[in-house]
């Protein structure tokens, strides 16, 4: 149990490593546009190429193709609706701009939305890593290393917009580490209190719901935001880089 928890913690801390890598230089408008596109690419790819295919395969084991598709589609739509409602709970750029200029206010809201979405994503990921490590230490080690690899881009996606908005390396790094620490925290809480309820059905449904949240955030918040700075090429290149890096991480997970 202790070794599995350590692996889960190290995998989560790699998000903080990604955050530190993004703080080497102060971001320009071009770099921020690229970072927001990058965050959109990261979250869209991990949702469509990793979370959804695995859950759809699981549902198809006990349901017909149409029924499995309807189950996944319904949960995905619920996740998107939940994301739209959560966005309404966050302050708009105009409210954040009281002490900031408009670009920094937009970057701050982007960091808040991205951090919340990745925090939700990291919770079931931590549960999976811990339970795998307890059941099979060798498989748990491989899984933790693979998750650590794809957590690094996630840390960049959280920290860089926050650094641009606040001009504070400490706050940006702390936000990236906090997002990653959701993995061991979620794993411990689940193992301690929710173990009887963590069925395959529950975890797969949760994965699809969170995928819906991340898809909505990518399309409705991050990608439009990356073009707001007048740097469409930088935003597009960042999006492409995010897709490619996450595909590499997903391949390592397999």
Image (tube, rainbow, N blue to C red):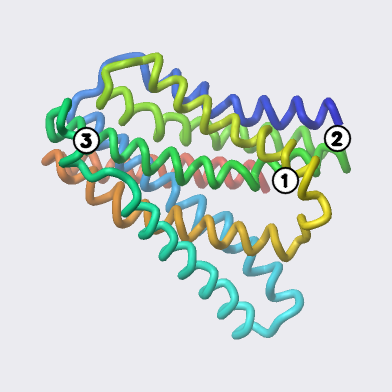
Residue situated in front as seen by the camera: 107 or 33:
107
The tag earlier along the polypeptide, 2 or 1, is 1
Which element carries disc 3, helix, strand or loop? helix
Describe residue 85's horizontal placement relative to residue 155 as left or right: left
Asked which quadrant contains residue 142, the reply is top right
Residue at mark 1: 128
Q: Quadrant of the N terminus?
A: top right
x, y (%) of residue 42? 44, 44
Residue situated in front as seen by the camera: 45 or 218:
218
Which element carries disc 2, helix, strand or loop? helix
Residue at mark 3: 96
How busy is the neighbourhood of tag 3: few (under 14 within 10 Å), some, or many (20 plus)?
some
x, y (%) of residue 144? 70, 34
Describe residue 135's horizontal placement relative to residue 166 as left or right: right
x, y (%) of residue 100? 16, 27
Q: Are marks 2 and 1 in contact (CB under 8 Å)?
A: no
Give me the residue at 77% from left, 49% from top: 194
Give me the residue at 60% from left, 57% from top: 207
Which element carries disc 1, helix, strand or loop? helix
* Viewer-side label of 2, 1: 1
The Cα atoms of the two marked residues, 3 and 2, are separated by 46 Å
Describe residue 27's horizontal placement relative to residue 148 as left or right: left
The tag earlier along the polypeptide, 3 or 2, is 3
Residue at mark 2: 137
Give me the residue at 48% from left, 62% from top: 79
How busy is the neighbourhood of tag 1: few (under 14 within 10 Å), some, or many (20 plus)?
some
């Amino acid at each position: 149990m202790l070794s599995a928890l350590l692996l889960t913690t190290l995998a989560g801390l790699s998000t903080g490593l990604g955050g530190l890598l993004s703080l080497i230089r102060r971001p320009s408008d071009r770099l921020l546009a690229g970072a927001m596109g990058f965050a959109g690419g990261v979250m869209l790819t991990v949702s469509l190429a990793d979370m959804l295919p695995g859950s759809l395969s699981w549902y198809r084991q006990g349901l017909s193709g149409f029924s499995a598709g309807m189950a996944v589609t319904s949960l995905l739509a619920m996740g998107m609706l939940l994301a739209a409602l959560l966005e309404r709970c966050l302050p708009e750029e105009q409210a954040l701009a009281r002490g900031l200029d408009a670009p920094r206010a937009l970057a701050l809201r982007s960091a808040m939305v991205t951090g919340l979405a990745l925090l939700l994503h990291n919770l079931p990921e931590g549960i999976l890593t811990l339970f795998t490590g307890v059941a099979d230490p060798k498989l748990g080690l491989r899984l933790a290393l693979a998750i650590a690899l794809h957590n690094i881009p996630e840390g960049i996606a959280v920290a860089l917009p926050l650094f641009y908005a606040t001009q504070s390396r400490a706050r940006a790094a702390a936000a990236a580490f906090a997002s990653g620490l959701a993995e061991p925290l979620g794993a411990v809480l689940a193992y301690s209190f929710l173990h009887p309820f963590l069925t395959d059905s529950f975890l797969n449904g949760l994965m699809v719901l969170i995928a819906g949240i991340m898809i909505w955030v990518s399309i409705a918040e991050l990608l439009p935001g990356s073009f707001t700075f007048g740097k469409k090429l930088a935003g597009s290149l960042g999006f492409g880089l995010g897709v490619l890096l996450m595909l590499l991480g997903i391949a390592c997970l397999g």
